[in-house]
Amino acid sequence: SQTIHQWPATLVQPVGSPLSLECTVEGTSNPNLYWYRQAAGRGLQLLFYSVGIGQISSEVPQNLSASRPQDRQFILSSKKLLLSDSGFYLCAWSVGGRSGTDTQYFGPGTRLTVL
Amino acid sequence: DQQVKQNSPSLSVQEGRISILNCDYTNSMFDYFLWYKKYPAEGPTFLISISSIKDKNEDGRFTVFLNKSAKHLSLHIVPSQPGDSAVYFCAASRLSGSRLTFGEGTQLTVNP
């Protein structure tokens, strides 16, 4: 069966510090991968998605970036965090082959607080 | 441009009764719809989906209804249980190749 892991579970970072969140998927090959953010009391905002290694599409301009160095690894990064980057970050995967049209399965999330 | 809308931010229901969660969409190109359930500090869990060729899909206590002419879908939970208390998100996509668009979510509270 497929599983998706995210870490860390919680993170408190000062403004201006760098960020690296990692997501890995097990039990499937060539998945589509996604990064979402849920701000307090809001819905899910798609940040990035990837259909293959090195292939990243950005949905919203921001100071975040994403990378996919391996088939089942997806990394969310920032060089300098802003207060507005606080939120709940979710990684998700779906069966590869079509871009985001299949059911997406979410990881446990990372709670990021920028102070 | 909020293409998927859940107009009720919250819903409170008695245990054993029916919960009806609603979702409206504006993009007529959407042809695949999903419902997710989310507990605090956890990732959303997939519940049930429906494609536009159907108007109803049932899975245990959960039934999703799709009214394409009204661009409206709903999730029925019956009987409701306290463990169903969570935020429910509806989502939509186009099978021709695009991402899921999520609604803002509805907080369901099932009272014992």
Image (spheres, coloured by chain):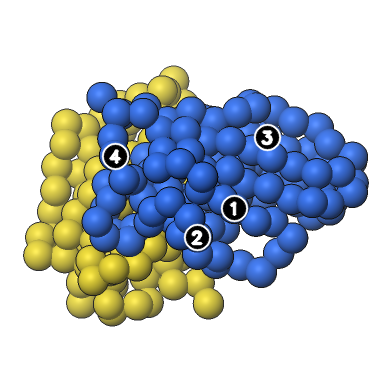
Disc 2 element: strand
- Identify the hue of chain B: yellow
Residue A29's label in the rendered image is: 4
Marks 2 and 4 share the same chain? yes
Comes first in the chain, label 2 or label 3:
2
* Residue drawn at (29%, 68%) of the image: B97
Determine crowd level at label 1: few under 14, some 14-19, many 20+ residues with C-alpha closer than 10 A: many
CB-based contact (under 8 Å), mark 1 and mark 2? yes
Disc 1 element: strand
Specify the chain shown as blue.
A
The residue beneath circle 2 is A56
Determine crowd level at label 3: few under 14, some 14-19, many 20+ residues with C-alpha closer than 10 A: many
Q: Nearer the viewer, residue A26 or B111?
A: A26
- Residue B69 lies, in percent from the top left, at 20, 77
Residue A45's label in the rendered image is: none
Spatial separation of the CA atoms under disc 1 and disc 3: 17 Å
Identify which amino acid the numbered label 4 is placed on.
Answer: Ser
Identify which amino acid the numbered label 1 is placed on.
Answer: Ala
